[in-house]
Image (tube, rainbow, N blue to C red):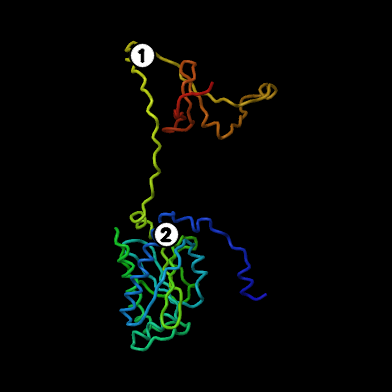
Amino acid sequence: MDAHAATTSETQPFDFRQGGILSERQARVLRQRHEELARALGDRLTLWLRSDFGLRLARVEAVSYASFIAGLPATTHLTLFKLEPLRGVCLLETPPPLATAVVERLLGGPGERLGETRELTEVEIALFDQWAQVFLEEWQRHFPEPPAPKPHLLGHESAPRFLQSAPPDTMMVEVIFEAAFADGKVPVQLAFPYPTLEPLLRQIAPAEEPAAATAPASPSAPSVPWNNVLDDMKLSVSAHWTGLEMTARELAALKVGDVIQLAPQIAAQVRVRLAGRAKFSGRLGTCGGQWAVELTGPDTTK
């Protein structure tokens, strides 16, 4: 068994948040926006490069940062950027063969073939930043809602395994495009920390409020005037639990200092009696450092 097979056969913990962090509505809106972005950006890059550039949205999904990094090639070109004024570092991943072909075209070459997989030189990175800037400016135009995030380039990385722009368990919104340029097609990816996009998602895809069920109107009870004679009348108020059963032997053996264990759900099954008559059900708790019972409804125990 080779090293690669051994690595891939290791059991990995599954993050149940994956795929579920985006609501159906948020995922739908993000797909629609990025489909529109792909069409507009393909046209813009074609004019900018004076060479056919096709862009198609492949998918939008939520993955952990660790999973995203693990899925990248050992050598690639990552552009790190921020969406001011939002927090977090976002990523634009472009395969080096596409990046070098774009740079060749910017330098006046034919740009007819994809390049090789290697690290870009400093000069190539500076030139390719122009392409990345066009890409992100077009993204900005398709997300104009407040807080109107503005992309700002931060830096670059060619070896993803050394990148630590977010904690491993951070959920990322991954947007994958298929770019067609020169003689090939390659994936281009955007990755946003979910906390970064969350304020924007609240604007473009607010949570749907569940429709409140309309309760049938019930006839109101006739009001009874208060009798002032009762103002100072004192009534005994007591709270009780029910449902605790013990054998006669256990009762006979009880002594001071013994602890009677109660099921946790009993704390929410308190009956409040007024002058010996059960009137309310309640829940045990504390208030101001003292024991208290919250009245949760009328007593319905027969």
Task: Answer whether labels 2 and 1 touch (C-beta < 8 Å).
Answer: no
Residue 35 image point, x, y percent: 38, 66
Mark 1: amino acid: Asp
The quadrant in which residue 11 appears is bottom right
The quadrant in which residue 212 appears is top left
Residue 219 image point, x, y percent: 37, 23
Mark 2: amino acid: Tyr
Report the residue marked by disc 2: 194
Report the residue marked by disc 1: 232
* Of the pair 55 and 274, the residue shown nearer to us: 55
The answer to whether 50 appears left or right of 181 in the picture is left
Q: Which residue sits at x=45%, y=73%?
A: 187
Label 2 to label 1, Cα distance in Å? 60 Å
Q: Which residue sits at x=33%, y=88%?
A: 108
- In this view, 151 is above or below 244: below
User: Looking at the image, how many numbered discs can be counted on the residues?
Assistant: 2
Query: Hey, which residue is sitting farthest bottom in the picture?
Result: 109
* Of the pair 101 and 260, the residue shown nearer to us: 101
Q: Which residue sits at x=46%, y=71%?
A: 163
* Of the pair 36 and 274, the residue shown nearer to us: 36
The mark that comes first in sequence, 2 or 1, is: 2
Q: Residues within 10 Å of mark 2 (few under 14, many from 20)?
A: many
Query: Hey, which residue is sitting farthest right in the picture?
Result: 249
- In this view, 159 is above or below 27: below
